[in-house]
Image (cartoon, rainbow, N blue to C red):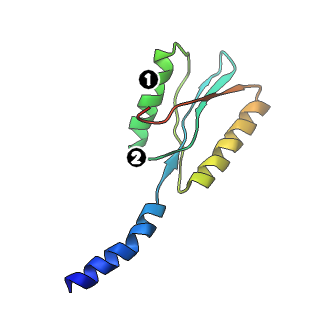
Amino acid sequence: MRALIALALIMALPQIAAAQDWRYCLAPSHADHKLYMSMPFAATMSVDAAETLFGRMLFKMGVHYDDVQCPQSDSESSAAVMQRHAVSMNHELGMQVINMPWKPGS
């Protein structure tokens, strides 16, 4: 019986690993007409923690921003699509998009 359970777990591991949430973070500065954005990353922490860390990094760099958001997606590719849409919309609004080389833990 234990062997069957172990085999079932081994077979399920690739599916569990593939079902990972992804995020990217963004922080607008409406007064400066800028949007600071991270690359997509695997969601290894809560949204609140990711938003806090991204905001802390911007603060340490002396960046003025209004708020931080870290939208969540169910895959890296859909997070990238969401990110491209955010870039496009912000360009239409006259915002300069600034890519930040940041991931949680970096």
- State if disc 2 and disc 1 touch (CB < 8 Å): no
**The residue tagged with tag 1: helix, strand or loop?**
helix
Q: Amino acid at mark 1?
A: Arg
Q: Is residue 45 left or right of residue 81?
A: left
Please give the label number shown on residue 82: none
Where disc 2 sits, the SS reads: loop
Q: Is residue 89 left or right of residue 19?
A: right
Q: Give coordinates of residue 9: x percent, y percent.
A: 32, 74
User: What is the quadrant of the C terminus in the image?
Assistant: top left
Which residue does the image show at 47% across and 29% down from the upper left? 54
What amino acid is labelled 2 in the image? Thr
Q: CA distance from mark 1 to mark 2?
A: 18 Å
Residue at left offset 45%, top offset 33%: 51
Q: Earlier in the sequence, mark 1 or mark 2?
A: 2
Residue displayed at 52% across by 12% down = 62
Q: Residue furthest left?
A: 2
Q: Is residue 55 above or below residue 3?
A: above
Q: Quadrant of residue 4?
A: bottom left
For image coordinates 51% across by 16% down, the residue present is: 61
Disc 1 residue crowd, few under 14, some 14–19, many 20+, Cα 10 Å: few
Above or below — where is 82 with respect to 65? below
Residue for badge 2: 44
Quarter of the picture containing the N terminus is: bottom left
Residue 16, image quadrant: bottom left
Tell me where residue 36 sits by quadrant.
Answer: top right
Residue projecting furthest to the bottom: 1
89 or 6: which is nearer to us?
6
Percent coordinates x, y for residue 101 in the rendering: 56, 30
Residue assigned mark 1: 56
Q: Nearer the viewer, residue 40 or 11?
A: 11
Pointer 2 local density, CA inside 10 Å: few below 14, some 14–19, many at least 20:
some
